[in-house]
Image: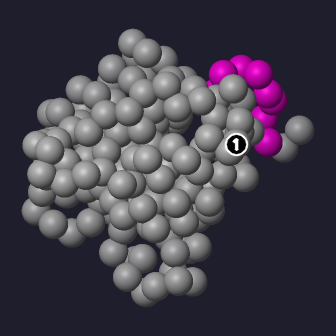
């Protein structure tokens, strides 16, 4: 089982002024696969809060995969990619590229996504959009590669070329 954390980044959601529908949509998609969602939290669009949570999920809980949602657009408060960049040890551009490519088949607005992904220790962190539709579409685009990548991170599988 792949251990997953879902981190929703939303000012309104963190204050109880909006119900998070994206985090539960991600969880529902993963429940039908070989994933175990062990952690879920909503944090405000604050760099320090996002970074602190990502480090905790990677270093203390040692999750295999952390999926953020929200904070990847052009708004002044959108800082999820920057927070992710500050805590990762290795940048993994392929997931963001694949998500944008797939999303561009649906809408030209996909090129506005600043979502990134990377590795901190043995945890893969992937930024998803804040909408349920966008998050699940993006997750569908990368699901085929996630198990192998995570197996490599956990030392359970060899490199891709073998």
- Secondary structure of the magenta portion, mostly? loop
- Where residue 34 appears, x then y in whole percent? 71, 36
Would residue 40 be seen by someone viewing this image from the given angle? yes
- Where residue 46 appears, x then y in whole percent? 13, 42
Tell me where the magenta segment starts and ends, as one range: 153-160
Residue ID at (26%, 39%): 42
Disc 1 crowd rating (10 Å Cα; few below 14, some 14-19, many 20+) is few
Q: Is residue 27 left or right of residue 127?
A: right
For the N terminus, the quadrant is: top right
Q: Is residue 105 magenta?
A: no
For the C terminus, the quadrant is: top right
Residue ID at (35%, 39%): 7
Q: Is residue 155 magenta?
A: yes
- SS label for mark 1: loop
Is 43 or 64 nearer to us in this picture?
43
Is 135 or 22 nearer to us in this picture?
22
């Amino acid at each position: 089982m792949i251990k997953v954390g879902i981190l929703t980044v939303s000012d309104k959601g963190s204050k109880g002024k909006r119900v998070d529908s994206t985090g539960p949509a991600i969880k529902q998609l993963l429940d039908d696969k070989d994933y175990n969602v062990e952690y879920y939290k909503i944090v405000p669009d604050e760099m320090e809060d996002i970074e602190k949570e990502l480090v905790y999920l990677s270093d203390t809980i040692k999750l295999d995969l952390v999926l953020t949602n929200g904070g990847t657009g052009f708004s002044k408060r959108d800082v999820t990619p920057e927070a992710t960049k500050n805590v990762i040890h290795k940048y993994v551009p392929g997931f963001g590229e694949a998500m944008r490519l797939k999303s561009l088949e649906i809408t030209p607005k996909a090129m506005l996504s600043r979502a990134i992904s990377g590795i901190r220790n043995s945890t893969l962190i992937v930024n998803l959009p804040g909408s349920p539709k966008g998050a699940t579409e993006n997750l569908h685009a990368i699901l085929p590669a996630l198990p192998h990548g995570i197996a490599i991170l956990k030392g359970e599988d060899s490199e891709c070329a073998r």
